[in-house]
Image (tube, coloured by chain):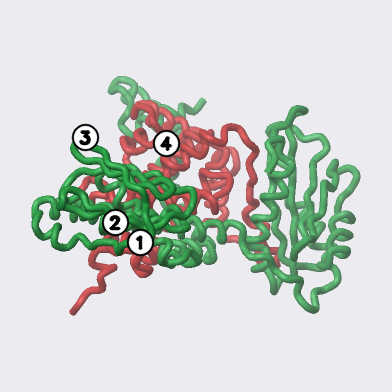
Amino acid sequence: MIPWEDLSRLLASDLPEAEAEALKARISAEPEVAAAYAQLQSLQGELADLDDPAPPPALDVAVLDGLTEGPRGVGGAWKVAAVSGWLAAAAAGLVAVWPATPVQPVSIEVDGHANVGVVPEEDGMKAIAASSVVGALAGAMLTVSVYEGTATVSQDGQTRTLQANAPSLAVNEPGVLLESEPDQVRSLKKQVADLKKQLAVTRLEGVLTKGALQAHEGTPQPWPDGLPPQFSPAGFESAVRDALLPEDGVVVETFDCTEFPCIALLRRVDPVEGEDWDARTLADAVVDNLGGGAISVNRANMDDDEGLVQLMAISAVPKDQREALGQRTEYRTRALMEAQSPEGP
Amino acid sequence: MATEPARQDPIHAALQGERQAWAMLLADHGPAVYGLCRRFADDPDDAYQSAWERVVRALPRFDPAGTASLRTWILTITHRHLVDRHRRRGTRGTVLPLVGLASSEPDAEQLLSRRQRQARLEAALQRLPDPQRRVVVMHHLHGVPLDDIAHGEGVPVGTVKSRLHRGRARLAELMEGSR
């Protein structure tokens, strides 16, 4: 019997000295143990030589687009205002209750030092002008709450509540105040720089998610003009059904021909735990019936209340259209299979 | 000669959303990340996307002066992410792409012997228990130190060593049996 695990430990110098010596003696005396040791050594090199499969080009492009395209599809002003509001709130523990209904802008002077501009708009996230709030915070730690036209300003334990009055006053810029407080300005600038960094990450995450979704689902493909009839829904279904022999113990679960190409979902009638399903024979038979073509086969093993369920999905296209077996078809295949899972899609 | 910003400091440039910087990161590290996803995840494309999301989130914390190279750091994040996904998914069924069946061209069967042995090795890897496969792939294919793997797995390094040796032993047995 070959002591594979101990040989592996010997290779890594993980074996106690006495055991290592004993094993080395066996390697010298027993050719089969020596051969096994040599195989383990070469195995390490072979593992290191294994190629990493390149991601599908479309996947990388989608990731790249997602990482770099910016907040496309979201109103720029909305985005900036929303994030700015968040920046200001995060910068100094500002508590803000966004208004449920539109209210008019107000401007509040606090102790003659700072102006807090509160500018609620229809979109609640735009409620506070960040520059004004940051300016106010340069002079004092404030809590500002806004709810349906009422602005509450708190400082040094004192709270004043002001009713929002129309017509509105302009939002005040904090420039003069910031210049007079250099230490706090520096501190705030650092906070803002940190938050900008976080903002960049947040923005990237958002667009990445969008790109991920697009890459994940792919783009529906139109049925090509001049498609050979054997790849039409009827032709493909016929090719698959004709490839299934009764002794194969395989039944058709469904055909999905809502998009090009069709996908056949098959189920093994009496699956055996630990026994692989010979997909190649069946796939070859389908290709033969189609008179050639590019084919994609995916399998799934699942457990339901009655035990093991084995599924196989087959789709096929003419050779010159093999790109159609890419991301979108993979996504549809996965969705079809997951729909069969006890947990659902 | 002026160097492009992305090449000078790709991490900073990436955080600024510069396309060239991300293209460089993807070109340099994408295949390794995808390799892990293909070998560890039942939905590798989705795992690849979400792994990069993790990388994006963590990138501001990467220390270029630290002990880990950017490659090892990215792979460690990907590894941890895939372990998390695996734990979340529990025993849910898996969809296994059948390598080699994507085309029926006549020469598809005529693989070189090296490619055949690699295919057998890949198949053998897939037969390892998940924890053993992760350790073998991370350590031997990507050169990640066992300590870092232990951190990603959330287990002592001794456990990782045991998994490594069992995994290698099982692989050797499987390769021996498939001759």
Residue tagged 4: A37
Residue tagged 3: A157
Residue tagged 1: A168
Label 2 sits on what residue type?
Ser
Q: Which is more N-terminal, label 1 or label 2?
A: 2
- Local packing at callout 4 (Cα closer than 10 Å; few below 14, some 14-19, many 20+) is many
- Local packing at callout 2 (Cα closer than 10 Å; few below 14, some 14-19, many 20+) is many
Label 4 sits on what residue type?
Tyr
Label 3 sits on what residue type?
Gly
| Residue A51 visible here | no
Q: Position of residue A81 (x, y in %)?
A: 37, 60
Report the chain holding disc 4. Answer: A
Number of marks in the image?
4
Residue shown at 40%/57% (left/top)? A104
Residue tagged 2: A107
The answer as to whether the residues below labels 3 and 2 share one chain is yes
